[in-house]
Image (cartoon, rainbow, N blue to C red):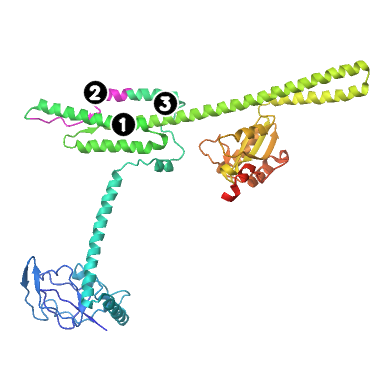
Amino acid sequence: MSTFRFNTPPGWPVPPEDWTPPEGWQPDPTWPSAPPGWQWWVPAEVRPPTVPVVHGRASVPVPVVPAAGPGFASWPVAPAPTAAAGPTAAAAPSVAAVLEVPRGKPGGLFSGKRRLEDENEELRTQLTTLLGLDPAAVASEAARLREHLQALRTEQAAIEAQLGARRAELVRTSEESELQEVGIYQYQHPLADAVAYKGQLAGLTDQIKVMARAGTAVQANTGWTVNGSAAEGRRMVTEYTKLMLRAYNAEADSCVARVRPHRLHTTIERLDKVAGTIAKLGKTMGIHVSVEYHRLRVQEITLTSDYRAKLDEEKERVREERERQREERAALAEFEREKARLAKEQSHYQSALAKLHEKGETAAATELEAKLAEIGEAIAGVEAREANTRAGYVYVISNVGAFGPDMVKIGMTRRLDPEDRVRELGDASVPFRFDTHALIFSDDAVGLESRLHNALADQRVNRVNVRREFFYASPAQVRDLLQRIAGQHLLAYHETPEALEWRASGGDETR
């Protein structure tokens, strides 16, 4: 078992044999600094060498000062530290740092003396066995490695600081990260339509051109002289100003051309960086983009973004209106075909009825009259459907193969046969046909559809375009909702989708 003693650096007075630094002790400021990597605690059996201390390339002998010299004699002798501060301890940067560990606290140099000495002796034996080194060599190598580790950590901290500074200067350009951060687009300049945005953009462009032509877009110091000539100095400043303005406008035009609603923030950030760079490069001559000109160009970017968002919105509205009109035309065509069929059938029965009356066959005539009454009611019903644009079928459909088991589409159609509309929805745009869970006829199908959509508003798949009628809900959830809302209109409901094409394609095995 080994104990340790305080290892006095070269040039310091030699303390008494069993002296250890008490808490708060500081060396005399007139004593020389300890050599780099100095081992403050060494095994008690290792005595200090009569060392020459190396300063630069020359070895200068250090005289040994008599024991109990200044700074030592007045302090009491304290117990030596335990093995916890032995060969594996890192070389401290100063004596004060080594000696600041309080006595008696858990984890300090002076706690658990016996246990730590035993543990240190065991570790020393293992190291000696494994590495073939003596304890002093192990302590020296550990100190060297810790110094190297500290240097690496310092270098890492410096590199991370530089990396943070560079990241702050970068403008995000990743399309994916921009799309992930975008929410529902908020218009910066709310206007009625795309035409209004186009008109405002034209007026803003005129203001930008006026400032550029007047020379107020970029500002600079004018008190320069070249070879003693103020005129040459003004010409130099003017040329540099034009060069900077051209560079700024090129980037601003690029931002306007490339801006999209989801890129608005990063596009403005890019132009801000360009303005800052120009100010930095032109600092000597005071060249910088004027605040007002930069504001106009940023406003141009935001207006352009709003204009494109409004254009997309209007295109989607036109597309959906065309789809609605197409559906309406299909419904009206069905009504006309059905009325023509019923009228033809009515005409046939009327001719037959006239012949029966001529022959005096009263019983047969009565039967045909009943049939004619049914046809008349059917014609009246079709005409009523045609006149009432709110009447129709609300359908609940799903497509397990395309969207999974927990998504449904809830829509409305005026078709006489609603399955025609369901079949159209399952065209080439989806891999499998839709399955129908419910078809509910209502004189106010528009209102019924709206109530269902409102009840599932929090489960909408597309929260931006509410005309997309898909919802995160299972057929069972929609059945319970329909029972509450549709009531007596709900005659039948198929909860489990057949999904014949999907199952025949091995869909059950792939999920």
Using the image, tell me which numbered label, if any, was put on residue 511: none
User: Extreme top residue here?
Assistant: 358
**Quadrant of the rendered structure where residue 364 is?**
top right
The image shows a total of numbered marks equal to 3
Residue ID for mark 2: 214
**Kind of residue sitting beneath label 1:** Ala
Q: Is residue 497 left or right of residue 187?
A: right
* Residue 386 % position (x, y): 69, 24
**What's the CA distance linking mark 2 and mark 1?**
19 Å
Q: Residues within 10 Å of mark 2 (few under 14, many from 20)?
A: few
Secondary structure found at label 3: helix
Task: Look at the image and say whether residue 8 sits in the magenta stretch.
Answer: no
Q: Quadrant of the N terminus?
A: bottom left
Q: Is residue 195 left or right of residue 142?
A: right
Secondary structure found at label 1: helix
Task: Look at the image and say whether residue 208 sits in the magenta stretch.
Answer: yes
**Kind of residue sitting beneath label 3:** Tyr
In the displayed structure, would residue 338 be above or below residue 477? Answer: above
Q: Are marks 2 and 1 in contact (CB under 8 Å)?
A: no
**Quadrant of the rendered structure where residue 86 is?**
bottom left
Q: Residues within 10 Å of mark 1 (few under 14, many from 20)?
A: many
* Residue 244 % position (x, y): 22, 31
Q: Please name the residue shown 56% across and 26% down the image.
A: 322
Residue ID for mark 3: 197
**What's the CA distance linking mark 1 and mark 3?**
19 Å
Mark closer to the observer (1, 3): 1
Residue ID for mark 1: 252
Name the residue nearer the viewer: 465 or 475: 475
Q: Mark 2 vs mark 1: which is more N-terminal?
A: 2
**What's the CA distance linking mark 2 and mark 3?**
26 Å
Magenta range is: 206-226
